[in-house]
Amino acid sequence: MRFLDSQRTQVLLRLTLYGGEVYKAPRACTAVRVRTGVAWVTHGGADIILPAGNYADLSPDKDHALVSALGGRPLVVELLGYERSMPHRVSGAALCPARDELPNTT
């Protein structure tokens, strides 16, 4: 069993995503932890499926992580990082509105 590094267990943001929603995590996040539901995390060219109770490490050297919900249940995730890495706490929508920032592929 792996444990999160106590230096980065500060929850920077907790958010709920529903089917079809995508969240672009800020680079300050060092891990994403799933509380309920199943997450699809794309980071550094890899796709990771995370069920509730699991987490994935995020590297600031790679692109932003994209997080979305899989299945019909809402997804609750916590974005973890060093407390000092975020200038102040803001709502998830104000921090990084992924839908507005994703390139249009149509």
Image: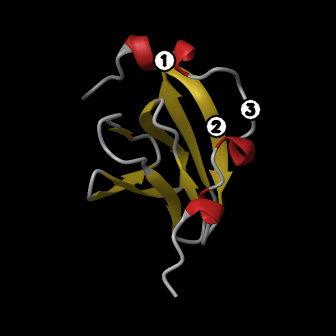
Where residue 20 appears, x then y in whole percent? 60, 72
Q: Are marks 3 and 1 in contact (CB under 8 Å)?
A: no
Pointer 3 or 1: first along the chain? 1
The structure residue drawn at horizontal position 29% and vertical position 36%, both measured from the top left corner, is 61
The structure residue drawn at horizontal position 61% and vertical position 70%, both measured from the top left corner, is 19
The answer to whether residue 49 is above or below residue 89 is below
Q: CA distance from mark 3 to mark 1?
A: 15 Å
Q: CA distance from mark 2 to mark 1?
A: 15 Å
Judged from the image, the secondary structure of the residue bearing numbered disc 3 is loop
- Picture quadrant of residue 99: bottom right
The 10 Å Cα crowd at callout 2, few under 14, some 14 to 19, many 20 or more, is: some
Mark 1 = which residue?
82
Mark 2 = which residue?
14
The 10 Å Cα crowd at callout 3, few under 14, some 14 to 19, many 20 or more, is: few
* 75 left or right of 28 in image: right
Q: Are marks 2 and 3 in contact (CB under 8 Å)?
A: no
Instruction: Say which amino acid is labelled 1.
Output: Tyr
The 10 Å Cα crowd at callout 1, few under 14, some 14 to 19, many 20 or more, is: some
Mark 3 = which residue?
90
Instruction: Say which amino acid is labelled 3.
Output: Val
Pointer 2 or 3: first along the chain? 2
